[in-house]
Image: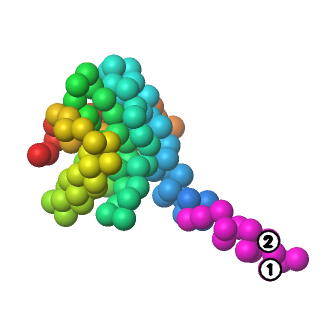
Amino acid sequence: MLFGRLVRWLDRGPAFRDPRHGLGRQGERLAEQHLRKKGLAIVARNWRCHLGEIDLVARDGDVLVFVEVKTRSDLGSDPEERVNEAKRRQIRKVAGAYVARVFEEPLIRFDVVAVVLLPGEKPVVRHHEDDFV
């Protein structure tokens, strides 16, 4: 009986075991709401391929926007500081794979959305448009 429960719990995936995944999902939802309010249309969420994952893919008019969302729940470093050069390279590669699959050559942009969720405070969402090339 206990073994069966453990197997079912493990089958639910890492998002159910690691509280950071729940925090990340919450940040992505807030980022998506923020982008929609700014007039962007969400095309894909958590798009994955063998090269990695892109949190959000959106359209801003004729521009295809690849969005990396970083969320913090403490007063450590700013979330956007965690998008380093290695992460940018990975996002560019995954974006290239996405564009290859949609068979178009759109204008593209890379944005970063930082979300700060401190206990008892209103969430802070910072959108950095065209953050890197």
Q: Start and end of the magenta stretch?
A: 1-14
Q: Which residue is mark 2?
A: 5
Above or below residue 123? Residue 46 is below
- Of all residues, the one furthest to the left in this rendering is 133
Q: Quadrant of residue 17?
A: bottom right
Residue 106 horizontal/vertical position (percent): 20, 35
Residue 83: in sight, yes or no?
no
Asked if residue 5 lies in the magenta stretch, the reply is yes
Q: Are marks 2 and 1 in contact (CB under 8 Å)?
A: yes
- Of all residues, the one furthest to the front in this rendering is 103
Picture residue at 21% right of the left edge, 42% below the top: 110
Cα–Cα gap, marks 2 and 1? 5 Å
- Label 2 neighbourhood size at 10 Å, few (<14), some (14-19), many (20+)? few
- Of all residues, the one furthest to the bottom in this rendering is 3
Q: Quadrant of residue 97?
A: bottom left
Picture residue at 16% right of the left edge, 41% below the top: 131
- Name the amino acid type tagged 2: Arg
Q: Is residue 5 left or right of residue 108?
A: right
Residue 2 horizontal/vertical position (percent): 83, 77
**Front residue of 16 and 77:** 16
Q: What kind of element bears circle 1?
A: helix
- Name the amino acid type tagged 1: Phe
Q: Is residue 18 left or right of residue 63?
A: right
Q: Which residue is mark 1?
A: 3
Label ID, residue 49? none
Above or below residue 40? Residue 103 is below
